[in-house]
Image (cartoon, coloured by chain):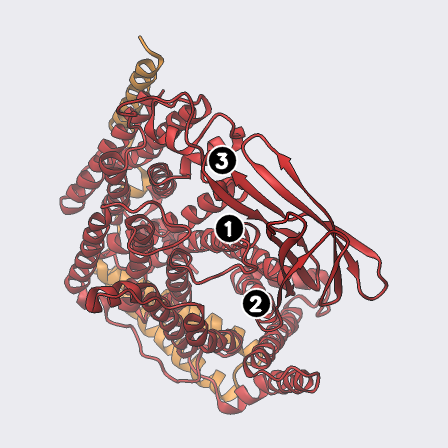
Amino acid sequence: MSISLVLSMLLALLVGAFLTGAFFEPAFAGDSVLPGSDALRALYDSKERSLRAIKDLELDYSMSKISPEDFERSKQELSLEVAVILDEIRKHEQR
Amino acid sequence: MIEFGHFSLCLAWILALVGCVYGAFLGCRAGSSSQVEFTRRATVATSVALAMSLVGLGYGFVTNDYTVQYVWQYSNRDMPWIYKITAIWGGMDGSMLLWCFFVAMYCALVARSSVSYPRPLRPWLYCFLNSSTLFFTTITLYLTNPFRYVKSFVGSDGRGLNPLLQNEYMAIHPPTLYLGFTGLAIPYAFCMAALASGHMSNDWIRLTRRWTLVAWTFLTAGIVLGGHWAYLELGWGGFWAWDPVENASFLPWLTATAFLHSVMVQERKGMLKIWNIFLVALTYSLTVFGTFLTRSGIVQSVHAFASTDIGWVFLSYLAAIAVVTVGLVVFRFSDLKPARAIESLLSREAVFLLNNLVLLSICFAVLWGVMFPVFSEAFTGQKQTVGIPFFNRVNIPLFLALIFLMGVGPSIAWRRSSPRQLARSFALPFVGAFLVATALVWAGITEFYPVLSYAICFFVLMTILSELQRGLRAQSGITDASEWSPSNIMSLARRHRIKYGAHIIHFGVLIMTVAITASMAHKIEREFTLAPGEKFVVGRFALELSEFHEEEKANYSAIQAHVVVRSLKDNSILQVLVPELRFYPRNKETTTEVALRMGQREDLYLILAGVDESGAKASMKVFVNPLQVWLWYGAIIMILGGVVVAVPVARVTTARRVELGGVSQSI
């Protein structure tokens, strides 16, 4: 038997065993968790974006990239946005 | 071992097919977790099979197995062993196999870390990851198989590798470039999986950005290494000739750079969703297009492989990518509406959008230049080529605009900024740039573009330093440390790693821009003939030919000239340069070996063009390239910046992440 044949058989066996192992694995933690509805996920994305926008705004302000007036106005707008999103999330989670 | 390599390739093809088809099946119908795991494992196993296939081919090269056509074609017994290894990717068939392995390796890395990804995304992700591997493996197995045997006569020795490729850069340049190209299949797979699964949260964006950065960093390194190879090996005194294949690597780099900027806008503002999908698909398409250019033979290039008839396969795949992308965008159109609009033109998102438009304009201009000979031949019957002047004329202003935006973007606030605030931020950099321009004109540099380029670079440098200073001031307010103390700097760098990593990249770009401007605008190029003992003066150097003689090496013969380089200032000897003219009898090819004196101020680049009929005089060509070495330094800084931004850092996650089953739902 040539070395190529032996190595080929060995590789096929190992790959076969590796693939079959998938059916003996316990379910993954990630898979057992509810992914959440699309609408809820979208709300969490919006919340994340708005919180990040506040963080960016504060950073820009601390680096004197925006005026105090613009900072106050934008922060109020974003805070209101976050409050509305959090309210929506709460309503979704109560359902 | 050749049979083993071939068997492994066949096995990889089957595994990729299974991963692709089964992934799509599970994406359409919710399968069990074991089935999804099976697809994930098939994705990982494909890379192992392809690695074994490469080992099989490599073994053929190392053991001089000339029964294999590819080994016979690209190696011979005299070649050093390192070139026998690099010969694996010296021709089209082996380079396709290496390409397949890299695609599969990236897919395996993604698959390995994908267990925690959102469940709806995963089957489709495996499907699209494997679709890339399947496409390239199909080509390798059925059209460019490197394991084919020689059909008739088996020679006792091979034909040998192209002498231009017998260079240490060939060990690292093509693999690095391929790692860049192939890595761009990952963002495409994520993007299509998100569209197909409907899991359109920010997860895919966050994951994609990191993989794009990894690929972008490799692509940057690959392009620069290619430039360095061309500079040292091709002997024309430059590093970039707007060659079609060079351009083919540059096109996806441009669109990937655009994506890396616009993705920040989507991540923060929920805008530019369709634009980003377009950029990701375009970037991947351009990598496939680059492969098509190199391997179809439709354009003439020093880098192109032999002309083949596999171009239609690539064109069909490009069409398939376009159809799938457009189809999925139309299908998910309602989910792709922007969360908000750009509030002000004086905002970072507006500048990023402008930056994207400039990058795409450069991309279009370069693409037009590449394809113009093909179009002109198709429509007029005559092939008309566009040369370096066209590319420079169109691209220089666009590049300068891009560099200018590089200074403006990071210094302007998100959402909106007031004109007064902008005036405060940019007044000093503008004044500095104006003073630099005035000083340069006063010093005698009067050409428009060089002066503009240096002034813009100074403007951007000032904005980067001002950003750093303002960041340190803000940070010192938090930590109570002094502004420029090492602890404050480290603390700032840790808190805003991506932001300052990007500044490192921008700083590298600045250094490169200055070097490119200097080497283009102030280059000296001379041709001369000398007999031993004669001198030639160029720049601040005197070149004296001391002798020239013939040398015999294992696989080539050479004529070497010994040129003493003296300083004009004090006549001291600076270096002895030895340019060569090599003849490879087996390949019947003559090449020039450049002699280079690399300096911080300038490179002295000497080529032996030939010896006259009497055999008493040597003809030479010399280039003095100012600040050339800074181009390579700038590139190293860029790559370091890419590494800083791309390397993941462990972050604290919240319970929300687990609740949502997402990648990371926390900020």
Residue B100's quadrant in the figure?
Answer: top left
- Total labels: the figure holds 3
Residue A9's quadrant in the figure?
Answer: top left
- 2 and 1 marks on the same chain: yes
Residue ID for mark 2: B516
| Circle 1 SS class | loop
Please name the color used to draw chain B: red
Q: Amino acid at mark 3?
A: Pro
Front tag of 2 and 1: 2
Front tag of 3 and 1: 3
CA gap between label 2 and label 1 equals 29 Å
Q: Chain of mark 1?
A: B
**Chain coloured orange in this rendering:** A
As drawn, the residue found furthest toward the front would be B614
Residue ID for mark 3: B585
| Circle 3 SS class | loop
- 2 and 3 marks on the same chain: yes
Q: Chain of mark 2?
A: B
> Disc 3 or 1, which lies upstream in sequence?
3
Q: Amino acid at mark 1?
A: Val
Picture coordinates of residue B143, whole percent (x, y): 23, 38
Residue ID for mark 1: B647
> Disc 2 or 3, which lies upstream in sequence?
2
As drawn, the residue found furthest toward the bottom would be B420
- 3 and 1 marks on the same chain: yes
Is residue B259 visible to the viewer in this orientation of the structure? yes
- Most foreground residue, B330 or B70: B70
